Image (spheres, rainbow, N blue to C red):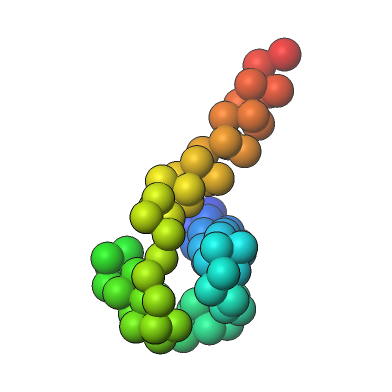
Amino acid sequence: MEFWLIANQFLIAFFAETLTKAGFPITYAEVTQKFIGKSLKTCLEIIETSYNKPLPKKFVELCKEREIAPLQQELNSSRH
């Protein structure tokens, strides 16, 4: 399997999980159907419209923290 495909699958799963934890339940399949090929800004607008409520103010920052923390942890553990 190509690296880019694995990375995309990881990001789709991550986005679905993060949205669900923020109170916007969505499946992996729904993310692929609704958001592939769209900008993050457009995706967030669709989500807010679909659920008729705003995302948490720090949602994007939360995504970045949740995405970066495991990668940093993995890097740190591989150095030892």
User: Does residue 49 show up?
Assistant: yes
Residue situated in front as seen by the camera: 51 or 18: 51
Q: Could you tell me residue 5's position as x and y percent? A: 52, 63
Q: Could you tell me residue 78's position as x and y percent? A: 68, 23
**For the point 66% across and 16% down, which residue is it?**
79
**For the point 27% across and 65% down, which residue is it?**
41
Vertical position of residue 80 compared to residue 58: above or below? above
Quadrant housing the N terminus: bottom right
Vertical position of residue 77 compared to residue 10: above or below? above
Q: Could you tell me residue 73's position as x and y percent? A: 64, 29
User: Does residue 38 show up?
Assistant: no
Q: Which quadrant would residue 46 be assigned to in this image?
A: bottom left
Quadrant housing the C terminus: top right
Q: Could you tell me residue 58's position as x and y percent? A: 40, 50
Q: Is residue 62 left or right of residue 76?
A: left
Count of numbered labels shown in the rendering: 0
**For the point 61% across and 26% down, which residue is it?**
75
Vertical position of residue 12 compared to residue 30: above or below? above
Vertical position of residue 69 compared to residue 56: above or below? above
Q: Is residue 1 left or right of residue 31?
A: right
**For the point 59% across and 76% down, which residue is it?**
25
